[in-house]
Image (tube, rainbow, N blue to C red):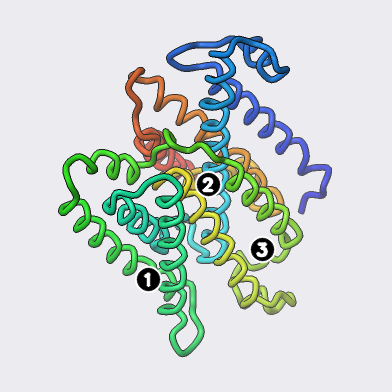
Amino acid sequence: MPGRRSLLPPLAVLALLGLAALLFSVTLGSASLMPGDVWAVIRGEGSPLARTLILELRIPRALAAFATGGLLAVAGALMQVLLRNPLADPYVLGLSGGASVGALAAMLAGLGGVVITGSAFAGAFASTLLVFGLAHGTGSWTPARLLLTGVVVAAGWGAVITLMLAISPAERLPGMLYWLMGDLSYARTPWAALGLLGVVCLALLPLGRSLNVLARGPLQAAALGVNARPLEWTIYLAASGLTAMAVTTAGSIGFVGLVVPHMLRLVLGNDQRLILPACALAGGTLLVLADTLARTMIAPEQLPVGVITALLGVPTFLFLLYRSR
């Protein structure tokens, strides 16, 4: 396994790419700016219009996109280790459906802002408890049982979402649909998502060796002295929390948590000590670029960022499957 020195070069490259993507996102838009304008605003100078555009609109949105992409990518990598299934993604256990039901219920009641965020997080947390409780039952859960329970619960949430959309007033339907497709237009507070991403990545780094062993199966983990059950609970709770925060920040955005870990494993190998921080950086960079494309492709109109990630993710994943035959 690589040592600490061998981890730094790829992470440094990904960090530089992330900074470049953030700068690109801040300067590009309906009113284009130069990098010098951004630097002037950071130093406390610049016109009032540039300060408002950069500090209140573009930087918060770009940071929210970076945090959301990182959360989804790290959650996807963890779910693939937990379920030992390369097709697992952050939404496979119904977390997105529970969050969507909570957010849509708040919208249907005419509420907004912080209430929608809180309702979405409560829905995701309720879905986590429901899936874990049903999968555990009176015995011990297995990855297959957890996966099947999550698929069934997700299908149930999908039926509830369809019902809520069918009975919702026409004037509220566009906002609800945009939220379901993933939308960063109203993401103005990225700090909680960034903080959670940093804390979880730092907390999981010491568990990197144990995660590498667990990815080979619980029997090998037990044979090598790794207590698999508490580690699996830790992974499940961490992935659930990351996914819930991502969904409450930007709605349902697909393919980031599925494609990014696959791409990085092809390039960097399967050492979780490297994959997890690399997923945080690469997932954030990908979603920043996708969101920039979503708000500039048909400017001044904006597309839901989930549409862009799906258009990019489907051919990319098919290509990765072809490469890994």
Q: Is residue 12 above or below residue 24?
A: below
Residue 249 position within the rendered picture, expressed as x and y whole percent measured from the top left: 48, 45
Q: Is residue 271 visible?
A: no
Instruction: Tell me the CA gap for discs 1 and 3.
Output: 23 Å
Q: Nearer the viewer, mark 2 or mark 1?
A: 1
Please tell me whether mark 2 sits on a helix, a strand or a loop.
Answer: helix
Q: Is residue 260 left or right of residue 300?
A: right
Of labels 2 and 3, earlier in sequence is 3
Read off the residue under disc 1.
148
Please tell me whether mark 1 sits on a helix, a strand or a loop.
Answer: helix
For the residue pair 175 and 131, the one nearer the viewer reads as 175
Instruction: Tell me the CA gap for discs 2 and 3.
Output: 16 Å
Quarter containing the N terminus: bottom right
Residue 152 position within the rendered picture, expressed as x and y whole percent measured from the top left: 32, 69
The circle on residue 313 is: none
The kind of residue tagged 1 is Leu
The kind of residue tagged 3 is Leu
The kind of residue tagged 2 is His
Q: Is residue 87 left or right of residue 272?
A: left
Q: Mark 2 packing: few (<14 Cα in 10 Å), some, or many (20+)?
A: many
Q: Quadrant of residue 300?
A: top left
